[in-house]
Image (spheres, rainbow, N blue to C red):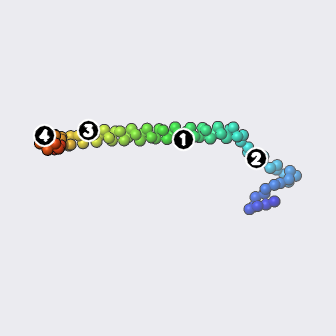
Amino acid sequence: MALFGLTLSRSPTEGDLPMPPFVIPPLLKWTLVALGGAVMVHWVVREVRRANEELERARARVRVTDRERRPYLRLDPETGEYRPQ
């Protein structure tokens, strides 16, 4: 029987024997899935740590330069409000 130009079944007398199906046992499938999941989790954790380190470096630079330009606030004893010095 031919479907879209492919032969679905052949008799052994036509020459070549058909290739047996490639079967993966269920335990091996689940093992491969678990390994793939572990690799993905490892990659995600590494990327999150890298991004956090990059953000911390940027935050540290902003803290140092921003602190110098901030006005210092003092409590005004008459009004009870904080005012820049």
Residue on which the image places disc 2: 21
Identity of the amino acid at label 1? Met
Pointer 1 residue: 40
Mark 4 to mark 1: distance in Å?
Answer: 59 Å
x, y percentage for residue 32?
A: 63, 39
Q: Distance between the residues labelled 2 and 4?
A: 88 Å
- Quarter of the image with the N terminus is bottom right
Q: Counting residues from the N terminus, which is met first, the one under dot 2 or under dot 1?
A: 2
Check disc 2: other Cα within 10 Å, few if <14, some if 14-19, many if 20+: few
Kindly identify which numbered label has been placed on residue 77.
Answer: 4
Asked if residue 85 can be seen in this view, the reply is: no
Q: Residue under circle 3?
A: 64
Mark 2 secondary-structure assignment: loop
Q: Nearer the viewer, mark 3 or mark 4?
A: 4
Q: In this view, does 16 lie above or below 44?
A: below
Q: In this view, does 50 lie to the left or right of 31?
A: left
Which SS class for mark 1? helix
In x, y percent, where is residue 22?
Answer: 73, 45
Q: Position of residue 67 (x, y in %)?
A: 23, 40
Q: Earlier in the sequence, mark 2 or mark 4?
A: 2
> What label sits on residue 11 in the rendered view?
none
Q: What residue sits 78% from the left and 57% below the top?
A: 7
Real-space Cα separation, disc 3 to disc 4, in angstroms? 30 Å
Identified by mark 2, the residue type is Pro
